[in-house]
């Protein structure tokens, strides 16, 4: 990893304020360890959950460089969630986002979907490391309707891996499901967060989650928008379900005037006024 990327990960994360030198030394130690020993190590996350950091996983580096990767987003979500909320994690990768929310909602209320075999194995490994039940971990791709679909079969977890990147290299066929068909799984729980990170396949996920949005009313939706603007079909689905889209300002405050950030949020219109206004509120 280049020094420039280490600088960005460590020094530009607001959560590292006051500890940047210590975190830099930790980052250097991790880089040496993964090149020399080439073995995983178990780390304790900021909220107490345990995580198995593998040398070939960029998420491992992110969690070592900062207690809260994507600091503003995670802190905003944590201020919004309530105890016992259901978290639906679509594109869970190795489970780091859900792990960092587990103390608030309880692992039994997390429903994680990850189709890539190696990432799903690591996701399951992290749940077992914490002695949590793995019943709600599903090796499924999520889209518009049920079926099956090919996905790149990588040798290590890749945060850029996606259905849309199929075309070269080894692939594996996995079940494709729509969230609307799985609503019974979180029946009786308020959905606190629907997180969608599927590297360009977000439109398909939203298309298969319209009943979820209309009837389960997730308190917060977070999705990736790589184009610098919300996809027109996604925007129409959100409007039809009576959701308002926004992004976070540099201070962590909801900004409804624009949606150009990579991580975009949406909230039911009836709960817009209940959102936390800024850091610490």
Image (spheres, rainbow, N blue to C red):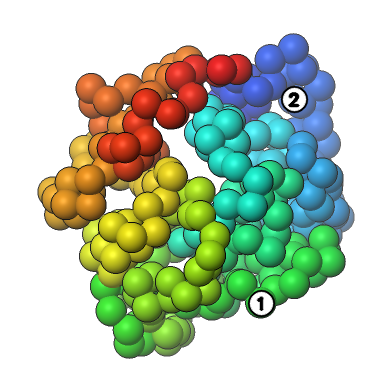
Residue 25 visible within the image: yes
The location of residue 161, given as percent across then percent down, is 44, 63
Mark 2, Cα crowd under 10 Å, few <14 / some 14-19 / many 20+, is many
* Quarter of the rendering occupied by the N terminus: top right
SS at badge 2: helix
Q: Quadrant of the C terminus?
A: top right
- Where is 117 relative to 212, above or below? below
Left or right of 179, for residue 111: right
- The numbered mark at residue 135 is 1
Which residue is at 44% across, 84% downward? 174
In the image, residue 172 lies at what x, y percent? 45, 84
Viewer-side label of 1, 2: 1
The residue at the far top in this view is: 18
Q: Quadrant of residue 104?
A: top right
Image quadrant in which you'd find residue 176: bottom left
The residue at which mark 2 appears reads as 24
- Please provide percent x and percent y for residue 15: 65, 23
In primary-sequence order, the first of circles 1 and 2 is 2
Q: Residue at x 68, y 64 (%)?
A: 108
Residue displayed at 53% across by 65% down: 188
* Nearer to the camera, 136 or 54: 136
Q: Image height check: is 135 above or below 226? A: below
Q: Which quarter of the picture shows residue 9?
A: top right
């Amino acid at each position: 990893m280049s020094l420039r990327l280490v600088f960005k990960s460590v020094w530009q994360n607001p959560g590292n304020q006051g500890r940047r030198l210590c975190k830099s030394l930790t980052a250097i130690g991790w880089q040496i360890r993964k090149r020399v020993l080439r073995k995983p190590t178990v780390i304790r996350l900021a909220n107490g959950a345990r995580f198995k950091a593998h040398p070939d996983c960029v998420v491992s580096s992110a969690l070592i460089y900062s207690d809260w990767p994507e600091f503003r987003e995670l802190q905003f979500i944590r201020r919004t969630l309530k105890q016992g909320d259901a978290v639906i994690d679509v594109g869970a990768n190795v489970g780091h986002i859900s792990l960092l929310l587990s103390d608030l909602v309880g692992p039994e209320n997390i429903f994680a979907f990850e189709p890539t075999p190696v990432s799903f194995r690591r996701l399951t490994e992290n749940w077992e490391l914490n002695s949590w039940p793995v019943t709600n971990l599903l090796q499924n791709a999520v889209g518009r309707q049920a079926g099956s679909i090919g996905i790149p079969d990588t040798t290590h977890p890749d945060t850029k891996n996606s259905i849309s990147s199929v075309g070269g290299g080894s692939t594996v066929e996995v079940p494709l499901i729509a969230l609307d068909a799985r609503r019974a799984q979180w029946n009786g729980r308020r959905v606190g967060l629907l997180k969608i990170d599927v590297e360009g396949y977000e439109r398909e996920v939203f298309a298969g989650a319209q009943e979820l949005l209309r009837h389960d009313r997730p308190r917060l939706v977070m999705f990736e928008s790589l184009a610098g603007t919300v996809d027109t079909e996604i925007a129409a689905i959100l409007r039809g379900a009576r959701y308002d889209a926004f992004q976070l300002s540099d201070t962590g405050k909801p900004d409804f005037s624009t949606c150009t950030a990579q991580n975009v949020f949406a909230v039911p219109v009836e709960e817009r006024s209940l959102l936390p206004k800024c850091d610490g509120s």
